[in-house]
Amino acid sequence: MRVNRHNYEINATPRLQVLSEDQIEAIYYASLRVLYETGVRVYATEGVDVAHAGGAIVEETTARSSLVKIPPDMVDKARATVPSKVVVIGPDRRYRMELFKNQIYYGGGSDTPFTLDPYTGERRRSTYQDVKNFARIAQALPNYDFHMSLGITQDTAVGTYDRWQYLAMLEGTSKPINITAVDIEGVRDQLEMALIRVGGKDEWRKGPIFSLYIEPVSPLSHSREVVQKLLFCCDNDIPFVYTPCPLAGATAPATLAGLLVQALAESLFGIVLSQLRRPGAQIIIGGLMSNMDMLSTIYCYGSPEMALLSAAYTDITKWLRVPEYETAGCSDAKLFDEQAAMEAAINIATSGLIGGNMIHDVGYLDSGLTSCPDLMVASDEIIDMVKRILQGIEVTPDTMALDVIAEIGPGGHFMEHDHTFERFKTEIWRPKLIQRQNWENWQLAGGQRYGQRVHARVIEILESDTAPLLDEAMFKEMRRICELADARHKDEELDVKMFV
Amino acid sequence: MSQTLEQITTGVIEGNIQGIRQLIQKALEEGLKAEEILQNGLIVGMNEVGKRFKVAQMFIPEVLRAAKTMHAGQELLHPLVTDARAVRVGTIVIGTVQGDMHDIGKNLVGMMCEGAGFEVIDLGFDLSPETFTEAIKVHQPDIVGMSALLTTTMRSMGHTLKAITEAGLREKVKVMVGGAPVDAEFAARIGADGYGHNAVVGAELARKLVEAA
């Protein structure tokens, strides 16, 4: 008997699934074996102590680290308290991320050493002004839900750059920000800045305006700074992203399932440690996993495996019911060219279809080394298209329009019908920079390639007048925090200028 | 050309670590000199690997297997050659600098340098400037190679170079740097002797630095 599945399962939103539930469970239980049998190396005694007090087995302790083995029941216990939803809200409270199953939000990536200069096209070390520019672009683009720096401020002090970088971002955007920090002192300073921006601790509790990016080192290593940051976040109501970046064939097995097992073990350690420190601590696990290119040795940001792994990991996190950090809008191309557009379109679509939560690295080129404003603008339109696809097709008596079809009948047309007039705007997606004019009109409009139109939009955003987001007193107060940090760490800087 | 030498060449290209020792033993029994085996067998193989890698006919895991095979052969020949430098072109001390735990790039450079005929002393990661200076005193290397993945830890490269200079060791070693955020301009700013933009170039650079010395 032929059964119409749609009678049982309404699939109003198109979606993708990479792993079956059986496969997810196989990977999950394999990760538990890694945590218990192989263990993870922890380079911070405070982290080892927390894990040990919670029941972990501690072995092979050296002057710098211990091997920590996590029995499965510790993971069960942690999973009982880890939140299935994390919320981050921008200083402008209209910009809200509710990170839970299938909720998609796109945003930039952080800390690229290089920027493609919007005026000269030159690839150069990124500066404070670049970081501010990227934030302004993110502010102007409707499909950017959160922001990451898209550049390291390299014209500021090296050891305290994180505070300046945050200040530059706050100057440009009032959306939620995923920050980076040199160490916990850097987190503390940025938290102080955030409290000034949002108006105190109570406001922060209503909705933290940043999350912290924390990256353990694959394979299975959790450095001192990483563990300290995790514990600090738990103690201070700071949501954080705990994202290993395993590389198939280099820092993880070449087989994608093996990489997923390892990545999950790395993330689960973060979940266990955070929930031991404070049940309910807000962790987002992720999200950047790819293959090493076996010719160039680069970390692939545009490979099909990157998109596939991210999607598979989303399946796992949905099953775990833990918010997820995902990767898309990025490419290995050196410029915003055809390759960049193609790779970004593929990974943006995949991340949307799978329902990844906090989808970062939009605007990355050059394997994560260079940020590109043009790719940001183009990605905004790609995301828009993907969101249209995700709206799916509503199937109701009204949308099937039987009466309209009957009314028009064979050989008529629908252009003048009220049904068309009323529904075309809500039903049919409209492009912004994508050009659909016929040849003659396209030529009359300047005959520009897509890339040229994208670039014109970048310049338009950068040269538009926008009201300052920070009032002068607030800016001064935050700047003071940056300067004090510089002064405290002055002696650690080199005698020579490192970058610019 | 002896058939055994050809087999040695093929052995390197195919990464036949188990077979290479027997083949070298066979070549020696046939009366071939260690220098000949090295020059006309192992090195010919490794050069071919380099060529094939450049045109995408061989890939990193295969190159590394070949380098390991080459190294196993060199170790066997080392006591037999009259000019030790023919086998061991130099000694390199490598490590990831203080504050940085990322060592995949450094490991890759190490393996490539071994394949290029260096004795490689890998100090590990998160290394203080003093660890480097002490290692220079102990191992007397020709080259020191430093790696970093973060801009904040790139600063440690500068500190390490300063420590090497202050310890009076700067004239004794060449210093090369690498890592994703590092570039040639930065290498020049901190006074390093060279920068390799990937592991293969790093190993080539190491050879150039010892040949120039």
Image: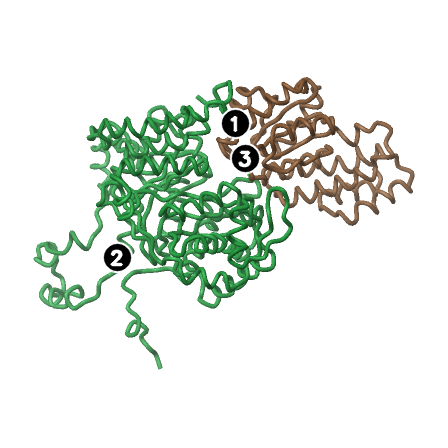
Please name the residue that numbered disc 3 is placed on: B99
As helix, strand or loop, the secondary structure at mark 2 comes to helix
Give residue A350's position: percent from left, percent from top.
38, 53
Give residue B154's position: percent from left, percent from top.
52, 29
Question: Disc 3 versus disc 2: distance between alpha carbons?
Answer: 47 Å
Residue B72, by quadrant, is top right
Kind of residue at badge 1: Arg
As helix, strand or loop, the secondary structure at mark 3 comes to loop
Above or below: residue A162 compared with residue A56: above
Is residue A381 visible in this depiction of the protein?
A: no
Kind of residue at badge 3: Gly
Residue B98, by quadrant, is top right
Which chain's residue wears label 3? B
Q: Residues within 10 Å of mark 1 (few under 14, many from 20)?
A: many
Residue sitting at x 19%, y 30%: A467
Chain A on-screen colour: green
Q: Nearer the viewer, residue A332 or A207?
A: A207
Give residue A297's position: percent from left, percent from top.
56, 40
Please name the residue that numbered disc 2 is placed on: A391
Mark 3 or 2, which is nearer the eye? 3
Question: Disc 1 versus disc 3: distance between alpha carbons?
Answer: 10 Å
Q: Nearer the viewer, residue B133 or A288?
A: B133
Which colour style is shown? Answer: by chain
Q: Residues within 10 Å of mark 3 (few under 14, many from 20)?
A: many
Chain drawn in brown? B
Kind of residue at badge 2: Gln
Above or below: residue A161 compared with residue A272: above
Please name the residue that numbered disc 1 is placed on: B155
Is residue A232 visible in this depiction of the protein?
A: yes
